[in-house]
């Protein structure tokens, strides 16, 4: 029933403007969503925020906006579930004319006092509308809608005082298909997410008794591509694997990091 409602609403908007044709052409992504990340508070005036959708093409764009929750495993894989009961999104559907800008307001309706930051995704789906008019039943158009292009933004509900607390639980050697690798295990013990932006890593090789046995090796963000800038959600863990650093003796290491 939800799908039928969506189809009818989008179709009505196009038909009212005379924009539906039997076999319309449709361009690729012709809109932008901003900002890429938005933080709301769970109560008060700041429990409402706004995104902007901007048309960048020369054809009308039909969009649907939805919100999901966001869970992330240690490898960075996301799982999402519908979170529509926790938010009001207005408008939930848009018909955007060429060059137009539409504000989409998002209001949190969920728990007013969460223990930690809650992570969500706001997703805009570009919709393709195809109207086929049957010869013997022209008053009953059949509309097929297919998602074309999605933008996915980060959305957080963050209680006041929430803060990240990222620690590096371990740095260890692992042989993967005969190649030496360094495995890093980060743990965000805090109540807000943290981006590993500007990550610098200090690795010290250890000898017998856990004593340093050689000079430390320093890795910059450029050497830590695929790790630097990655996200660790509140109370989340991330594990990263990279080739064993050049100049670092293979074996036990101690590691510290900085975010600059």
Image (spheres, rainbow, N blue to C red):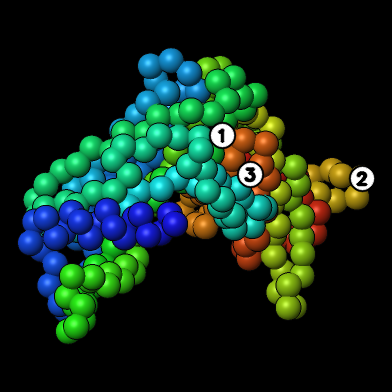
- Mark 1 or 2: in front is 1
Q: Residue at x 59, y 40 (%)?
A: 233
Tag 1 secondary structure: strand
Q: Is residue 47 visible?
A: yes
| Relative image position of residue 26 (x, y in whole percent) | 18, 71
Tag 3 secondary structure: strand
How dense is the environment of label 1, judged by Cα within 10 Å: few (below 14), some, or many (20 and up)?
A: many
The quadrant in which residue 28 appears is bottom left
Q: How many marks?
A: 3
Residue on which the image places disc 2: 209
Q: Is residue 62 left or right of residue 201?
A: left
| Mark 1 / mark 2, whichever is N-terminal | 1
Q: Which mark is residue 202?
A: 3
Q: Quadrant location of the N terminus?
A: bottom left
Residue on which the image places disc 1: 118
How dense is the environment of label 2, judged by Cα within 10 Å: few (below 14), some, or many (20 and up)?
A: few
Residue contact between numbered discs 2 and 3, judged by CB atoms under 8 Å: no
| Relative image position of residue 117 (x, y in whole percent) | 57, 30
Q: Residue at x 23, y 37 (%)?
A: 103
- Mark 3 or 1: in front is 1
């Amino acid at each position: 029933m939800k799908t039928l409602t969506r189809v009818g609403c989008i179709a009505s908007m196009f038909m009212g403007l005379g924009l539906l044709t039997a076999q319309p052409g449709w361009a690729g992504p012709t809109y932008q969503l901003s900002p890429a990340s938005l933080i709301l508070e769970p109560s008060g005036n700041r429990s409402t925020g706004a995104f902007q959708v901007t048309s960048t093409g020369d054809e009308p764009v039909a969009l649907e906006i939805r919100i999901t929750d966001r869970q992330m495993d240690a490898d960075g894989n996301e799982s999402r579930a519908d979170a529509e009961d926790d938010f009001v999104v207005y408008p939930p559907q848009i018909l955007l004319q060429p060059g137009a800008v539409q504000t989409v307001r998002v209001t949190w309706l969920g728990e007013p006092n969460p223990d930690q930051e809650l992570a969500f995704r706001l997703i805009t789906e570009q919709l393709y509308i195809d109207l086929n008019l049957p010869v013997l039943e022209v008053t009953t158009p059949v509309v097929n809608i297919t998602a074309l292009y999605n933008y996915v933004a980060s959305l957080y509900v963050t209680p006041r005082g929430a803060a990240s607390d990222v620690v590096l639980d371990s740095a260890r050697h692992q042989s993967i298909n005969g190649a030496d690798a360094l495995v890093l295990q980060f743990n965000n013990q805090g109540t807000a997410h943290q981006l590993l932006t500007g990550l610098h890593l200090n690795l010290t090789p250890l000898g017998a008794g856990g004593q340093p046995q050689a000079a430390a090796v320093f890795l910059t963000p450029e050497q830590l591509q695929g790790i630097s800038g990655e996200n660790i959600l509140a109370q989340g863990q991330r594990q990263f694997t990279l080739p064993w650093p050049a100049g670092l003796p293979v074996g036990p290491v101690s590691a510290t990091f900085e975010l600059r």
